C-alpha cells in the first residue's frame, strides 16, 4: 500500500520536473541569465522549484504573440 503511494508520488514528481524543464527550454524569457537561473532552481529544488516556476511564469516571460493577423477593413 505505502510502496504504491510512494511510487505514484515519485512518478508525478518526475513528470512535473520534466514538464518544467521542457517548458523553460521552449519559453522566451526577458534575459538568458534568467533562464539559466530557473534551470538551476529546478535542478536544486525539483518540486518546489517547479511549482514556483509555474506560479510566476508570466512575470518572467515576454508577452509577444507569435500569430498577429492583418485584417483588412471593410469598405
Image (cartoon, rainbow, N blue to C red):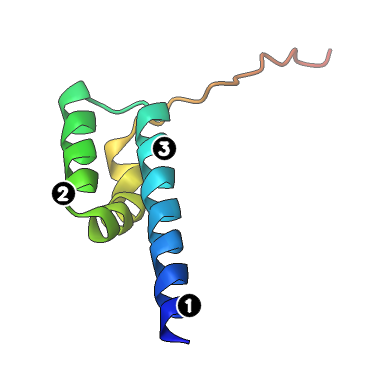
Q: Few, some or many C-alpha atoms within 10 Å of disc 3 (few <14, some 14-19, many ≥20)? A: some
Which mark is nearer the camera, 3 or 1?
1
Residue 30 got which mark? none
Left or right relative to 35: residue 8: right
Residue 4 got which mark? 1
Q: Which of 22 and 10 is in front in this view?
A: 10
Q: Where is residue 73 in the image (x, y as percent from the top left)?
A: 75, 15
Kind of element beneath mark 3: helix
Q: Position of residue 66 (x, y in %)?
A: 54, 21
Left or right relative to 70: residue 2: left
Residue name at image x 21 percent, y 22 percent: 32
Q: Which residue is label 2 attached to?
A: 44
Q: Which residue is label 3 attached to?
A: 23
Q: Residue furthest right?
A: 75
Q: Few, some or many C-alpha atoms within 10 Å of disc 1 (few <14, some 14-19, many ≥20)? A: few
Which mark is nearer the camera, 2 or 1?
1
Q: Earlier in the sequence, mark 2 or mark 3?
A: 3
Quarter where residue 20 is shown:
top left
Q: Distance between the residues labelled 3 and 1?
A: 28 Å
Q: Few, some or many C-alpha atoms within 10 Å of disc 2 (few <14, some 14-19, many ≥20)? A: few
Quarter where residue 47 is shown:
bottom left
Q: Position of residue 45 (x, y in %)?
A: 19, 54
Q: Is residue 44 above or below residue 67?
A: below
Amino acid at each position: 500500500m505505502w510502496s504504491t503511494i510512494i511510487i505514484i508520488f515519485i512518478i508525478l514528481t518526475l513528470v512535473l520536473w520534466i514538464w518544467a524543464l521542457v517548458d523553460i527550454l521552449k519559453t522566451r524569457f526577458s534575459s538568458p541569465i534568467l533562464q539559466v537561473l530557473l534551470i538551476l532552481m529546478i535542478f536544486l529544488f525539483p518540486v518546489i522549484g517547479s511549482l514556483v516556476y509555474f506560479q510566476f511564469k508570466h512575470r518572467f516571460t515576454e508577452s509577444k504573440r507569435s500569430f498577429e493577423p492583418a485584417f483588412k477593413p471593410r469598405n
